[in-house]
Image: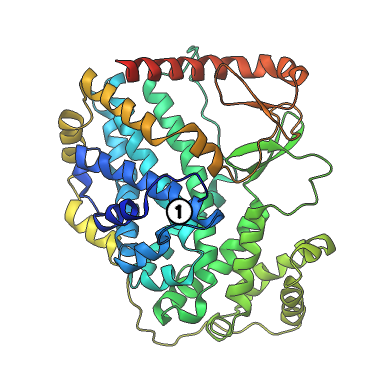
Amino acid sequence: MGDLEVLLPGEAEALVQVLQSFPLWEMGSQGWCRQHEQLEKLNMQAILDATSPSQGEPIQELLVTHGKVPTLIEELISVEMWKQKVFPVLCKLEDFKPHNTFPIYMVVHHEASIINLLETVFFHKEICDSAEDSILDLVDYCHRKLTLLVAQSSSESFSVPEGELELSPLQELQKQAQTMEFEISLKALSVLRYITDNVDSLSLSTLTRMLSTHNLPCLLVELLEKNPWHRQEEGQLKRFEGGRWQIVTAKDYPKLTKLDGQVWIALYNLLLSPECQPKYNLTGFNKNQLLKLRALLTDILLDQIPNLVDLQRFLSHLAVTEPLPPKKDLVMEQIPEIWSRLERKNGGKWHAIAKYQLKHIFSPSEQDLRLQARRWAETYKLDVMEALSPEKPKCASCNAEASKRCSRCQNEWYCKRECQVKHWQKHRKSCDLMAKALDGMKEEVKA
């Protein structure tokens, strides 16, 4: 933590103790907003704890001590269901107005906050153990997100309808939700990898869920084939790192990304661990899918993750082994409970929930908006946000390490003045929008 901290030790424990999962119809309410801000602070403090010694009990220990990991998972799945079932209905209501988008964006952002916190703390084995039966729901959640990644292949762009010069507030909200969904799915990949690190302590039902019900090894192979965190744009290869798309230079091209590494380590755990090997059915289909990995196991990759030599040997043996017939054993499987319970409670009420929220929650007064803007400004302090950055900023023009920031929007970084001038035509529109938003927030805070 050093000299920088978001929460005092006693304050962090108090916030963890009051964590709760809200009903769908309360999402966006005042109590829910307070918890969202508290989660953001816990999230930031957890990242600081992971990078420097903490003066108090680390956030992951507090979550275990107070039994709040299942609560976080339930809240995560609740907001996922809200986005799938209620959000589309909200966007179609006749009473929807531009000023409704700000509070709705908070709910959309909430899922990203929770999965980011879980990604930070699930590195620790005790967190995985303390999830108890809710780990089944989390595995299902990660499977849904990875399936979405494979289906999309990349972060799809949101196009402006023909004849319109810019996005409406509703379209901007939908675009932000779409972009955030891609980033959330990448976080879910990391969480899943950390779960596979602990296969020795997972229940039989969880292993069965991962290996048989969802066939995660084959899904991970597809993910490596699709490689959605890489894309071609204007003749340049880009990859998604540090929360943004960055140009891949010739020097960086051979380097393995963190996301690629997460997939390979998860595959290693699921295919080679003593707990998983006897339980994974190597049918003809599974065998053919897994053998696609042989072409990807290059010398450059093996140099960066030497343990994958064992996976290479496994695949060489698999290539000369006869596939097994599908197993027909009777298996007693525990079913994830959170999603089905939420559906039973709220099914058929999506339109009623949307109408209630638009009338009572998502139609704030000017005073409410000013208050919320002030609270957000207090939560997201610039010095803390910069300290949380996983890597040094890169120049938006040449991708070199950058030390100068656009003074107007405070969003883009450059290594020198020449690069900023060269990039201005591309940056101008987003700079105008960001600067306008910053000015608006400053005015709200002053008011």
Q: Is residue 436 left or right of residue 14?
A: right
- Residue matched to label 1: 46
Q: Label 1: state its secondary structure.
A: helix
| Residue type, label 1 | Ala
The residue at the point 49 percent across, 60 percent down is 191
Decide which of 219, 195 is in the foreground and name it. Answer: 195
Q: Is residue 192 above or below residue 330?
A: above
Which quadrant of the rendered structure holds the C terminus?
Answer: top left
Foreground residue among 352 and 113: 113
Q: Whole-percent x and y of residue 294?
A: 76, 68
Q: Residue 85 lies in what quarter of the image?
A: top left
Position above or below: 358 against 268: above
**What sort of colour scheme is used for the picture?**
rainbow
Say which residue appears at 42% left-offset and 35% top-offset. 380
Relative vertical location of residue 436 with respect to residue 210 in this rendering, above or below: above
Image coords of residue 414 (percent x, y)? 70, 26
Q: Position of residue 138 (x, y in %)?
A: 40, 62
Residues 205 and 42: in front is 42
Tell me if mark 1 has few (under 14), some (14-19) or many (20+) residues whose alpha carbon lies within 10 angstroms of its own: many
